[in-house]
Amino acid sequence: MEYVAIIGGLLLAWTLLQCIRCVAISKRRNKNIPPGPVPLPLIGNLHNILGDQPHQSLARLAEKYGPMISLRMGQLTTVVISSSAVAKEVLQKQDLAFSSRTIPDALHAHNHSQFSVVFLPVCSQWRSLRKVLNFHIFSSNRFDASQHLRSQKIQDLIDYCRKCSQSGEAVNIGQAAFEVMINLVSNTIFSKDAADPYANSGKEFKEVVWKIMEEAGRPNFADYFPLLKTIDPQGIRRRIGKHIDKLLQLIEELINERLQQRSKLPNNSSTDFLDALLNTSQEDAQAINRNHIKHLCLDLFVAGTDTTSSTLEWAMVEVMRKPYIMKKAKSELADVIGKGKIIEEYDITRLPYLQCLVKETLRMHPPVPFLIRKVDQDIEACGYFIPKDSQVLVHVWSIGRDPAIWEDPLAFKPERFWGSKMDVRGQDFDLIPFGFGRRICPGLLLATAKLSVMLASLLNSFDWKVEGGIAPEDLDVEEKFGITLARSRPLRAVAIPL
């Protein structure tokens, strides 16, 4: 009875607020907002996207209502852009107005959104953190200096696949790639591995990152009904808070270990990212402090692991489904590099078909289905009115499958990029898997380099067959919606040494 009374009270309060809100925005409703389905009382248009594949539901709505549509998700106004032409027209010209991001309620846990370079608005603090990232990780000098580390981690992946092959064990491609990525990020920051594919060392580190990704990808009613934030009805913020706390504790331990080392060796010449952050903090504690360091490390682990490993898994799925594509890619590798030889990043420029294969994977399977933005003031865009505080979703998944742009868009055809100068650096709005403008992913060059070399190395070192003798054409491409678009079932494949 008490629970019913609480819910009843919340509904009554919500109804009163809605009445006040309706009066306050009555003038807005006379303005030309983007078209969309009629919202229902209370839930708005949530029923239009319920299900396990909301990105597909939104694509179908775009087919009916147009390339820019508006939805009411509970109390949250959401504008969805599903056309590259509209995205370019709106966002390229008004990038600053669309540069904020909606913050999911779950990521208020441990005040992460107040320190995260992913969710901070474009402000002096955000610029300081981006500057640190760009200079100490993503600059061309750092990129070149850390190439040996990436080569070693990819060789670890090949060695692991070879050991599995010798024992007749199938390789879980996504998990193996995830462990490579988490160790690469860990070595970049802390100069040590966080996961060992042969043992349980680092298992906790790996599992907590997985759980943060899983919880962050769950639909949360607290995001659509602000009154529910106080009670966290699905428990998502509480659960993700525990996982974030665990990861922050692990990061804290590594920071304390480093501070002890620095106190004993004050002239330490270490050049990893943690030392760079600690040095910057000593020079200017207002620009970056201990909390910034911990949450920046958390951002790198969460954003830099699952996205690349999931994309590699999709690339392997698509290549294995089409033997002629695998044959063509292997032929190029054998001719240019030599069958079974080690592949380095500088080799990628000599492998045009492999580059086409990577672009086609990013077209059909972008790391995230939506680029999430928010407007902090009323905006006019493409003749439509977008109210203040609206969430804006750029539907990257839908743009990559738009028949107005791509011939035979549901077919995996790397050849479509042959001779094309289109790239993924945010200038060609037909292909923006890493975003654009101020909010473009700072690690896109690093991500594409890792993805390309890992894929090329797997193809040049082994032949592959699906576990259980499944025919290549029977491999499914069902998606599991979340913060990234993973495959619904992990790809387990048997490596056959060349």
Image (cartoon, helix red, strand yellow):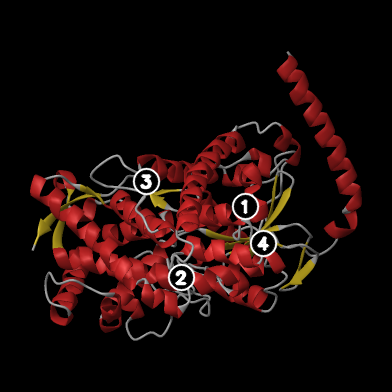
Q: Secondary structure at mark 2?
A: helix
The residue carrying mark 3 is: 488
Residue 81 percent location from the top left of the image: 61, 65
Compare residues 125 and 451 and report the one nearer the observer.
125
The residue mark sitting in front, 2 or 3, is 2
Q: Amino acid at mark 4?
A: Ala
Label 1 vs 2, first from the N-terminus: 1
Q: Secondary structure at mark 4?
A: loop
- Characterize the local packing of mark 2: few (<14), some (14-19) or many (20 or more) Cα atoms within 10 angstroms: some
The residue mark sitting in front, 3 or 4, is 4
How far apart are labels 3 and 4 at the CA level? 44 Å
Residue 291, numbered label: 1
Residue 290 in view, yes or no: yes
Q: Amino acid at mark 2?
A: Leu
Compare residues 473 and 153 and report the one nearer the observer.
153
The residue carrying mark 4 is: 285
- Characterize the local packing of mark 4: few (<14), some (14-19) or many (20 or more) Cα atoms within 10 angstroms: few
How far apart are labels 1 and 2 at the CA level? 25 Å
How far apart are labels 2 and 3 at the CA level? 25 Å
Does residue 309 appear to the left or right of 253 in the view shown?
A: left
